[in-house]
Amino acid sequence: MKYYLYYLGIINLAGFIYYGIDKMLAKGKSKNRISEAWLLLLGLVGGSLGNILGMHMFRHKTKKIRFYLVNFLSLVIWTFFSIMCFINR
């Protein structure tokens, strides 16, 4: 269970950081930005809370409904999964 929490902490921190980096690259008009698919994938594999916090903290991708849908649905699924894991320990 300890490793599960480590995993979630690291993947959420990564999602948060990646949103910040992509926002910084977007301001500089860089062509080497982080792909939208990668940002969405981070949310799907457990980093949805970090992604949501990054979206709002950096004001990045907030106008794209797809990012809200994927991240919030993923957050609900991961929260349910986490609760079930803790209940059935």
Image: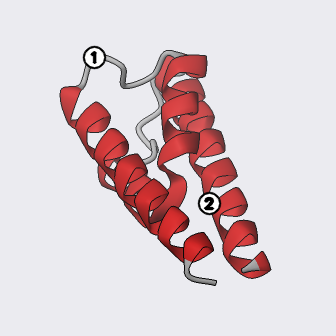
Tag 2 near tag 1, CB within 8 Å: no
Q: Give the residue displayed 29% in from the left and 47% down from the top.
A: 73
The amino acid marked with disc number 2 is Ile
Nearer to the camera, 4 or 65: 4
The amino acid marked with disc number 1 is Lys
Q: Which residue is mark 1?
A: 63
From the image, which quarter does the N terminus lie in?
Answer: bottom right
Query: Looking at the image, is mark 2 or mark 1 earlier in the sequence?
Result: 2
Q: Give the residue displayed 61% in from the left and 71% down from the top.
A: 86
Mark yes or no: residue 42 visible. no
Q: Give the residue displayed 57% in from the left and 48% down from the top.
A: 15
Mark yes or no: residue 76 visible. yes
Q: Give the residue displayed 20% in from the left and 27% down from the top.
A: 65
Helix, strand, or loop for circle 1?
A: loop
Nearer to the camera, 79 or 73: 79
Q: Which mark is residue 27?
A: none
Q: Which residue is mark 2?
A: 11
Nearer to the camera, 6 or 87: 87
Name which quarter of the figure residue 28 lies in. top right
